[in-house]
Structures are given as structure tokens and as C-alpha cells.
Image (cartoon, rainbow, N blue to C red):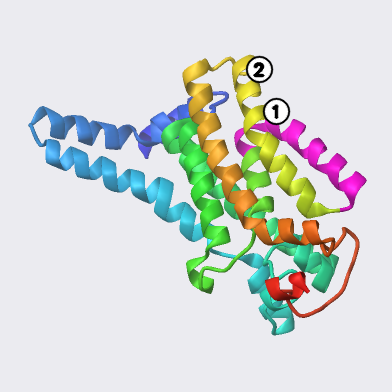
Amino acid sequence: MEILLQSAASAEALDLESLGRIVIGRSGSYIADCASRGSFGAVFWVVTVFSVLALLVVPYFLGSINFGIIISKLFHGEDIREYGSGNAGMTNMLRTYGKRDAAITLIGDALKAVVAVILGRILFGISGGYVAGLTCILGHAFPCYYKFKGGKGVLVSCSILLVIDPVTFCIVIPFFIIVVAISRYVSLGSILSAAVYPIITFCVHMFVYNVGIERALIHTGLVLCTSILLIYMHRSNIQRLRNGTENKFGSKKKTDVMNDSDVVK
């Protein structure tokens, strides 16, 4: 802690990776000490437990805090998953309860994503940020607090993208807006944006950040996992788009949740 405070005071600007090296400095000293004494078992378990907690456990539990469900129950005594599309995300909150509740959901879900990514990136660099972000999205989509039924993860993914890769964010988000503006389908914009996300990431990391082919492929692989998850979470929307029954942006109806049998009919 003393090292962190002294370094923070003396440096005019610290990026997240530099801060990470300071934060884990004490842990690194302990690990080196164990290694010098031949205590490789202790080293292995310290590194393993620390990594699992930082990249998997903490981000997952953060992601499992679903503000759409919390707000709908707190303000209305209802479960947002029982209305509209059945999704516990911002879009369904907007259609069902209006702008105020949607805004609160947006802020809450965005903040949990930002905290998860910053934690992963401070401790393990950009790749750690991607892993922590993906774990946070998994928690949002399959929250342990709410019987593993949560949101689709679009808002959380956008927040993660803004923190970890602002250049790609500035390309993907306008693409999303254009698709929604033309089609009036938020789900279609989300699906197509998820599809092009890995391609844009690879190009940006190769030709803008110049990180090299190896790191670009690693980051693109992690992004691809996120994209696959997002598209999978929109499988019911894809079916409704095919059937012409998907809700368009701007429609506001508080209706019981639409299930797959309703879509087929």
C-alpha cells in the first residue's frame, strides 16, 4: 500500500497496466520469496486463487447484480422478466416502465461492467480486462441471484467496450445506431453489431494500436467469445425477426412475456 501511494503521488499520469504492476508488487515479492525457498506449491496456489478470484469469481458476482430486476421489484413490486420480451435489460425496462427506470438500469448495469473490467485490467492488463468483462456478461446473462435468468448483455458489453477499447467503441456504436435507425429493431442492431465486433477489433488492434498479430488474435478470440454469447442470447429475437413479430424501437406496451409458442402462432 505504501508503494502504491508513493508511486501515485510521484507520477503525473499512470495508465492502468502501470498501476497494476504497482498493486501486485507486494504479491510479486511474496511469490519471488516463496520461489527462492523452493515453495513452488505455495506460489502455484497463490497465483491460481488470486487469478480465479480477480478474473472469474468477482466479475461474475458483479454481473449477477441485475438492476432491471431490482428496480422493477423495488418500484413496482413486479418482475420485469414477466413482461414484454421477458428480458431483464434496459430496452425492455424502457418499453415496460419508461425512461426513468430504464435510465437507472443503464447506470447500474454500466457501472458494474466498468468495475469488473478495471479490476481485470489493473491486475492482468488488457487481456485480463477482456476476460473479466466476458465473465461479467456471463453473470448478467445467467445471474446466480435470479435463477440464472437475466438480460442479454448488450448494455454491459457496450460499457466494457468503452472502457477497454474506445476506438472500436466509436466504430461499433455508430454502426449499431445506423442499423436501428434504418430497421427500427434494437435486436437486429445488437445482433449485427456483435457479428462485426470481432472483425473491427482485429483491424483496430492490428492497424491502430499496432499490438502485433499474436496479441491481436488473442484479443479478437476473447471478443469472438463475447459476440457468440450475445448472438446466442438473442436467439428468441432472431426467431421473432424471422416471423415478423419482433417489437420495433419506440413501441411501449406492458404485456405479459411472449414465449416461443406465442411467436410460432
For the record, the magenta segment spans 163-184
Residue displayed at 56% across by 64% down: 65
Which residue extends farthest left? Answer: 38
Estimate the x, y position of residue 101 in percent, counting from the top left. 77, 68
Label 2–label 1 contact, CB within 8 A: yes
Against 228, is 213 above or below?
Answer: above
Along the line of sight, the residue nearer the viewer: 62 or 82 = 82
Q: Amino acid at mark 2?
A: Val
Estimate the x, y position of residue 150 in percent, counting from the top left. 60, 66
Q: Which mark is residue 208?
A: 2
Q: Amino acid at mark 1?
A: Val
Q: Secondary structure at mark 2?
A: loop
Tell which circle, 2 or 1, labels the residue nearer the N-terminal end. 1
Residue displayed at 52% across by 55% down: 138
Return the residue at label 1: 167
Q: Can the viewer see residue 8 in this picture?
A: no
Q: Look at the image and say whether residue 219 sits in the magenta stretch.
A: no
